[in-house]
Image: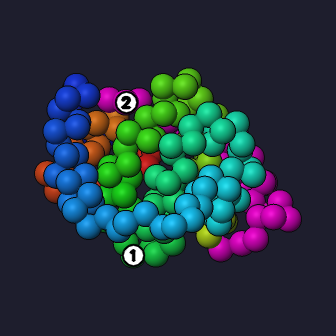
């Protein structure tokens, strides 16, 4: 990748801590009626495509929603990186549960594009997901995530192949 990533969880948390503090400072108060991000909108559509992923890692739903919102504007690559690193811990769930290989393709940019731009209720994105899974690609390790987010905070990270 050509970037230096932190090598310990402590280093990763330390490097991502400023972004988390900034986000907490501007967080809005909870709504009176919370909406389950796993069941609503584009994330709900992704969950319908791959329930085995989101049922095991429900904490990833909000993170995926943030990335999807950033991803919908292709000119906002920096915003996608920011959201990805801000929610890095949620994405680590896929690794910790041992489902990263089957679930990472759900976050493939082609699948995200399909979900953002098409109605997947009719199954329009299922072939896109199948193609992404067949194509494979390198799913990240925790170390990869730490390296990427640490380099991003230093302003030197290009999007690695595993980032949507």
Q: x%, y% of residue 60? A: 51, 45
> Which is nearer the eye, 90 or 131?
90
- Judging from the image, the colouring scheme is rainbow
**55 in magenta:** no
Span of residues in magenta: 117-143
**Compared with residue 83, is residue 113 higher up or lower down, i.e. above or below?**
below
143 left or right, relative to 8: right
Q: Do the residues labelled 2 and 1 touch (CB within 8 Å)?
A: no
Judged from the image, the secondary structure of the residue bearing numbered disc 1 is: loop
Residue at 25 percent of width and 52 percent of height:
20
Left or right of 115 in this view: 67: left
Q: Name the residue under label 1.
A: 75
**Snapshot quadrant of residue 53:** top right
Please tell me in which quadrant of the rendered image residue 126 appears: bottom right
State the residue in front, 69 or 41.
41
Residue behind mark 2: 142
Q: Is 139 covered by the magenta stretch?
A: yes
């Amino acid at each position: 990748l050509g970037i230096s990533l932190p090598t310990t969880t402590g280093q990763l948390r330390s490097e991502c801590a400023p972004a988390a503090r900034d986000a907490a400072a501007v967080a809005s108060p909870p709504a009176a009626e919370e909406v389950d991000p796993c069941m609503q909108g584009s994330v709900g559509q992704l969950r319908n495509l791959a329930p085995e992923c989101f049922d095991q890692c429900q904490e990833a739903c909000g993170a995926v929603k943030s990335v999807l919102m950033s991803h919908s504007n292709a000119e906002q690559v920096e915003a996608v990186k920011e959201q990805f690193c801000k929610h890095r811990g949620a994405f680590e769930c896929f690794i910790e549960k041992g489902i990263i290989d089957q679930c990472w393709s759900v976050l493939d940019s082609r699948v995200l594009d399909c979900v953002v731009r098409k109605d997947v209720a009719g199954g329009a994105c299922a072939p896109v997901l199948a193609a992404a899974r067949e194509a494979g690609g390198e799913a990240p390790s925790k170390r990869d995530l730490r390296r990427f987010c640490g380099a991003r905070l230093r302003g030197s990270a290009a999007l690695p192949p595993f980032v949507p």
